Image (cartoon, grey):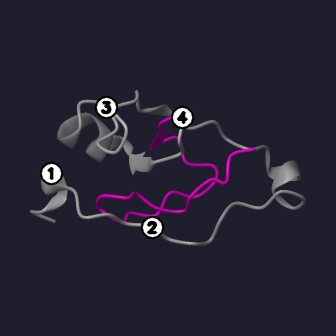
Amino acid sequence: MLILKPNCECCDVDLPPDSTAARSCSFECTFCKDCAETRFDNTCPNCGGELIRRPIRPAAMLAKFPASTERFTKAHAACADL
């Protein structure tokens, strides 16, 4: 099950569980749409995998299976100007 990270690993923008702007790879590295497209060409800078739109967990299931609240950022060269 996806943990639904709450932020972009690059710019730290909030990505709530219902965000259509969240992008992730198969390892759940998570980025906002803007960073994924403009900084990484939709390729994960960590593993080289494809960054695709993260699925939205139905609101009724969030109570039983909540999204993560642990924020994660990483110093990628493409994020240095932020």
Precedes in sequence: disc 1 or disc 2: 2
Chain-order first, disc 4 or disc 3: 4
Tag 3 secondary structure = loop
Q: Tell me if label 3 and label 2 are in contact, CB under 8 Å.
A: no
The part of the chain drawn in magenta is 1-25
The residue carrying pointer 2 sits among few (fewer than 14), some (14 to 19) or many (20 or more) residues within 10 Å by Cα, namely some
Location of mark 4 (residue): 26
Q: Extreme left residue here? A: 81
Q: CA distance from mark 4 to mark 2?
A: 16 Å
The amino acid sitting under disc 2 is Phe
Relative placement, left or right, of 34 versus 64 is left
- As measured in the structure, the alpha-carbon distance from the residue carrying label 1 to the one carrying label 3 is 12 Å
Please give the residue where the numbered disc 3 appears in the rendered image: 43
Nearer the viewer's eye, disc 4 or disc 1?
4
Task: Give the residue displayed 15% in from the left and 51% down from the top.
Answer: 78
Q: Amino acid at mark 3?
A: Thr
Per the image, the residue denoted by label 1 is: 78
Say which element carries label 4.
loop
Q: CA distance from mark 1 to mark 2?
A: 16 Å
For the point 81% across and 56% down, the residue is 62
Query: Any mark on residue 34, and which?
Result: none
Q: Main secondary structure of the magenta part?
A: loop
Q: Which comes sooner in the sequence, label 4 or label 1?
A: 4
